[in-house]
Amino acid sequence: MTNKTLKKTLLWLKTHWYIPALVVAVIFLSVASKQKAQALIDIIKSNRKNYEDAIKKIDKINKEETKEIQKIEQDKEAKIIELDKERDKQLLKVEDNKKRNVERLKTGTNKELADKLKKEFDL
């Protein structure tokens, strides 16, 4: 074996130590008692089933959260559109008021305009 292969093997054993331990335990228990080996296999299957159930629950929760986030984003976009429309309406009102004020100021004489300005700005 090369040094690289040995390092990889040791790393795998360090990470997955429970696999060789389970193999040794299963062999030992099967020799000692067929019933105990079956109990260990049942425990392993039970753990795997619990793991798969937990993964399914996590996936379900993740899907629900994703749907909720999408709904919030859609509501936000609708609210932004609504606010944009309201702002546009307000801007139109301001422009109309501005035009009316300018027209009203155009119709008066200079003396009337001066009086209106004095009155507006308390001069």
Image (cartoon, helix red, strand yellow):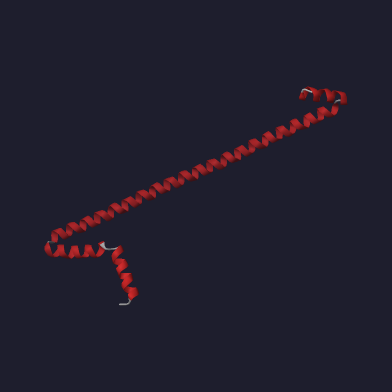
Quadrant for the N terminus in the image: bottom left
Image coordinates for residue 94, horizontal then vertical, percent? 72, 32
At horizontal 54% and vertical 41% (from top left) the residue drawn is 76
For residue 14, above or below residue 111: below
Q: Nearer the viewer, residue 104 or 116?
A: 116
Image coordinates for residue 19, horizontal then vertical, percent? 26, 63
Q: Is residue 107 visible?
A: yes
Quick check: 72 left or right of 12? right
At horizontal 38% and vertical 48% (from top left) the residue drawn is 60
Image coordinates for residue 100, horizontal then vertical, percent? 78, 29
For residue 81, above or below residue 39: above
Q: Is residue 109 visible?
A: no
At horizontal 76% and vertical 32% (from top left) the residue drawn is 98
Q: Nearer the viewer, residue 47 or 14?
A: 14
Q: Nearer the viewer, residue 119 or 88?
A: 119
At horizontal 56% and vertical 42% (from top left) the residue drawn is 77
Q: Which picture quadrant has residue 35?
A: bottom left
| Residue farthest toward the left in the current orientation of the protein | 32
Tally of marks: 0
Quick check: 88 left or right of 2? right
Image coordinates for residue 95, horizontal then vertical, percent? 74, 34
| Residue farthest toward the front in the current orientation of the protein | 123
Quadrant for the C terminus in the image: top right
Q: Which picture quadrant has residue 2?
A: bottom left
